Image (tube, helix red, strand yellow):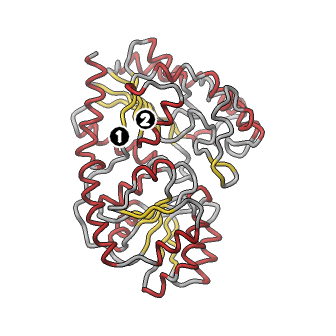
Amino acid sequence: MKVLIVHNRYRKAIPSGENSVVDAEIAILHTSGLDVATYLRSSDEITEMSGAQKVAVALGPIRSGQGVRDFTELLDSEKPDVVHIHNVYPLISPWIIRTAHKAGIPIVMTVHNFRLDCVAGTYLRDGQVCTDCTSTSFAMPAITHGCYRGSSIQSVPMVMSRSIHRSTWQLVDRFIALTGFHQEFLVRMGIAPDRIVVRPTSVTDPGAGTAPGKDVLFVGRLGAEKGVDVLLEAWRISGAEQFGRTLHIVGDGELREAADRAARMDPSIRIHGMQDSAHVAELMDQCGPVVIPSTCFEGLPLVLAEAIARGRPIIASDIGGLGRTVTEDFGWKVPPSNAVALAATIGALTDEQITQRGAAARERFLKEFDQAVTTPQLIGIYTELTSN
């Protein structure tokens, strides 16, 4: 069986778990014996384009001429049995779904975020959950507020794409939703439930690893949507340093300066900046709970799967897919954007709780998030569609 994987990679300057997930999926499908072809573009290409090319890219969310041509050529040369799509913005465009459908090739699409309905992909505006566009056929609020990359002008083609491609999504044969929350989102979009499969973000089993430590770890983009400001305030009032705990922060973003400032004032905060996966794994092995204090409707962050694979319990915001995934047996849930509640949870941590919930996290990983479990599920989806 040959599968064609399609993904528009996010810029290198913006850490992307989605890029890592796609790379890992390509590798595991190769290892599983499938013939894998790829159509991969990168948003970094835009910086090297001429002015005329950038004008064409601006219309890419509706129909990318280059993207459709490249994709059509790949269908002709590779003759895939199934097409699996991840991200198509801004260089590929949803139009390729129409192309694959016309060619009679089954289409699978993993929904990592909420961009099918929200041009920002997060349902977040000015630090607050926003669903102003949900009931609209033309998302004028997104243009008014410049929801795509902070620009009203750049938001226009995204809004037009949202309207034009409502019918295009109906041509996808099988959607992969990361959580039940994503599944409900797709149903609200008009997708039939029998065309949706829930399959979480997964990673390869790294082994049981070491016993969890005392420290708390954050890994992610240092942005407001990730709740970094909430975390810093929560740590300040938690008193966790009195129990010998340290907060380790890995990542970069617009709140890096605020994080550095907090670390200068509080020696129990350590800022590691951007780190490769090997260093992140080392930190996870040293630490205890991994905190994911997001303020938006997260997808299913890669760091969650990586953490529970190593037997690390999760402290997460009770919002979106995170709220549906994290349970009290292997973690703690707190109201989003609530520094006081997060501080109370961190301050009340005990070594016994961390150990018990860490063991439960490892069990949950082996049951649902291990690639040894999720890869046969994915191949089963391909097989079902191609046999039909």
Please state which of the two labelled residues, at mark 1 or mark 2, is closer to the viewer.
1
Q: Is residue 105 left or right of residue 126?
A: left
Q: Is residue 71 left or right of residue 336?
A: left
Asked whether 239 or 259 is in front, the reply is: 239
Residue under the point 26% across and 65% down: 359
SS under mark 1: loop
Query: Can you say whether 222 is above or below 236 in the image?
Result: above
Circle 1 packing at 10 Å, graded few (<14), some (14-19), many (20+), is: many
Determine crowd level at label 2: few under 14, some 14-19, many 20+ residues with C-alpha closer than 10 A: some
Report the residue at 52% width, 25% height from top.
190
Q: Pointer 2: what residue? A: 110
The amino acid at mark 1 is Arg
Q: Is residue 330 left or right of residue 156?
A: left
* Residue wearing tag 1: 199
Horizontal arrangement in the rendering, residue 369 relative to residue 119 (left or right): left
Q: Nearer the viewer, residue 70 or 373?
A: 373
Residue 257 location (% of width, % of height)? 65, 70
**What x and y, as percent, mark residue 141?**
74, 37
Question: What's the CA distance linking mark 1 and mark 2?
Answer: 9 Å
Q: Is residue 21 above or below residue 281?
A: above
Which sits in the foreground, 356 or 62? 356
What label sits on residue 338 in the rendered view?
none
Q: Tell me the quadrant of the picture where the C terminus can be found.
A: top left
Task: Give me the residue at 63% from left, 21% from top.
Answer: 164
Cβ–Cβ below 8 Å for labels 1 and 2? yes
